Amino acid sequence: MGMTMAEKIFSRHTGRDVRAGEIVLADVDATMSHEANRPLALEVFQEMGGDKIFDPKRVFMMLDHHFPGYSAADAVSNQKMRKFCAEQGCTLYEGEGIAHLVMPEKGHVLPGDLVVGTDSHTCTYGAMGAFSCGIGSTDMGVTLMTGKLWFMVPETIRMNITGKLPPGVFPKDLILSIIAKVTADGATYQAVEFAGPVIEAMSMDGRFTLSNMAVEMGAKAGLIAPDDVTLEWVKKRAGRPFTPQKPDGDAVYAKTMEFDVSDLPPFVAKPHYVDNGVPIEEVVGTPINQANLVSCTAARVEDLRIAAGVLKGRKIHSGTRMFVTPASREVLKTALAEGLISTFVEAGCHVGTHNCGGCAGVIFGALADGETVISTANRNFQGRLGNPKSFIYLASPATVAASALEGKIADPRPYFK
Amino acid sequence: MILEGTAHVFGDHINTDYIIAAKHKSRLSNLDDMVEYIMEDIRPGFIKEITPGDFIVAGINFGCGSSRETAPWVIKKAGIAAVLAKGFARIFFRNSINIGLRVLRVDTAGIRQGDRIVVDLASGKVENRTRGDLMTTQPMPPFIQTILDAGGVKNYLKTHKTFDL
């Protein structure tokens, strides 16, 4: 009987064949923790009597959520993390960008890996065929001691995605439409495998967008089988050997779902739930005050190119503020070289530091009562950006750019004819 | 062990941003200072409604969203004896087990705000004294129950030294 990707990866990290439903103790290839979740993982490690972390080469810490530091509490956490990493010899990335792009960019996550991070969007690395999931600070403190953690091997939902994304419709639209169908807890405790010709034709940037949002349907992981696209992306970044895993042809899935994207319209998730996604026709014309091109979901190079393409030679609406924060320093460098940043500035956007600020509820772009923002981020919960009386719509970079131009939610497709 | 307290009823998909908003968990380094803001954005002043020993009662997907461990922490620190819900999001469920916050899966559809609830942890029976209804909790894997019974994973590892699956 064949195995799913999750079963194969857990088998490899446990040293024996394991199946969905088993509880196993597995070796972890890499850990990621950032400064936003308290207690800090290092504090839990120290409280548990930890002296040396299991392997400095497999532990990575990030200052990305609050970087460059929004409060006195941040300054204290940041200093603790710098000190810990210096003492332990593990790598701290300070202001290099959002963890979920920096980890793959620097080659710290590779196909076939098992990775944990103190962030729910750690599932992003599933796009590279790594089983990666979010855990809490205490679980991370435990992992830092031994490099092992217990897991229940999940069942998998297979999603076959066929057809071709129409012009003006992007991976973010696809994932919002999938989540709307599956619902916010439709994949709880399960892994998802995204497969089919649409995935095979998709860039890594697009794949990261899909996997990033797997947690928003409750999934433990959002996996894409590594292929030539993955290996091409990885080869200049990998600094160690890796063993890609693909699902067997006769793997057993909890459920298989088919999605044909041939007629998929742009999708927008309405306040205040991520699975409240609707075709754009239902929200077109909604006035907006702010547009955010931000976050680990969709602020990579491809996303910035798409948005810049819509904005080039134009100015955003006088009543709308638009913020652009590239997902990493690498993305910023490429965007500068390609003239994308100039396009954003000329259009009237505010370009900011590559961090999690515009998504994670850390204050930038504060909203007044009744204000509306349209964002490329992954969550629109009430109060997520600080004001429970504001409204957050989630959309693709193209929709966000088009909406900023028009001062209201706008269908991006006319800009792609 | 028997738990008895008042039910504080919430709906479906109560996410961890509602349980403790980012604007508080980011600015405060001391977890004790965050407790007063529990559920503030959806139920202002909720902290004042809680008597130690009470229950949070919810629908599906409780604790969805961010992995912040401060979410189960503030619930425990606020004096909630257990969260009863139709379903839990996985990271929240795991975090709760790890810090020793009791999370019980049970059909909560018939429980209303203010009902008097009695939970028999040994048998898994949940009694709604106000309405006379009886429910049974869904058991969890024995290994996970052991961590919870130890009061969380730090205590568990003090006695077990390693994970005894």
Image: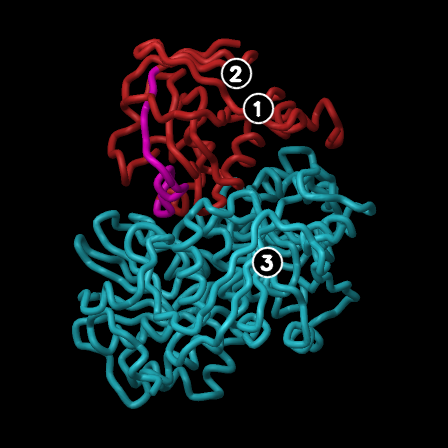
Residue at (67%, 78%) from the top-left corner? A232
Question: For this rendering, which residue is in front, B121 or A323?
Answer: B121
> In x, y percent, where is residue B105?
48, 27
Q: Write down the chain letter for disc 2.
A: B
Q: Do the residues bearing badges 2 and 1 touch, measured as CB atoms within 8 Å? A: yes
Q: Colour of chain A?
A: cyan
* Real-space CA distance between mark 2 and mark 1, rounded to the nearest whole angstrom: 8 Å
Residue at (39%, 81%) from the top-left corner? A167
State the extent of the magenta-drawn residues as a range: B6-23
- Give the farthest residue toward the right: A15
Q: Choose top left, top right, bottom left or bottom right for residue A166.
A: bottom left
Q: Which chain is red?
A: B
Residue A291 visible? The answer is yes
> In x, y percent, where is residue A277?
34, 58
Task: Determine whether the residue tagged by mark 1 lies in a helix, strand or loop.
Answer: loop
Count residues near mark 3 (Cα–Cα under 10 Å), then give few for <14, some for 14-19, many for 20+. Answer: many
The dot on residue B124 is 2
Return the residue at label 3.
A193
Residue at (32%, 79%) from the top-left corner? A413
Residue at (53%, 41%) from the top-left corner? B91
Model colouring:
by chain
Quick check: A379 left or right of A159?
left
Q: Write down the chain letter for disc 3.
A: A
Return the residue at label 1.
B139
Question: For this rendering, which residue is in front, B50 or A198?
Answer: A198
The amino acid sitting under disc 1 is Pro
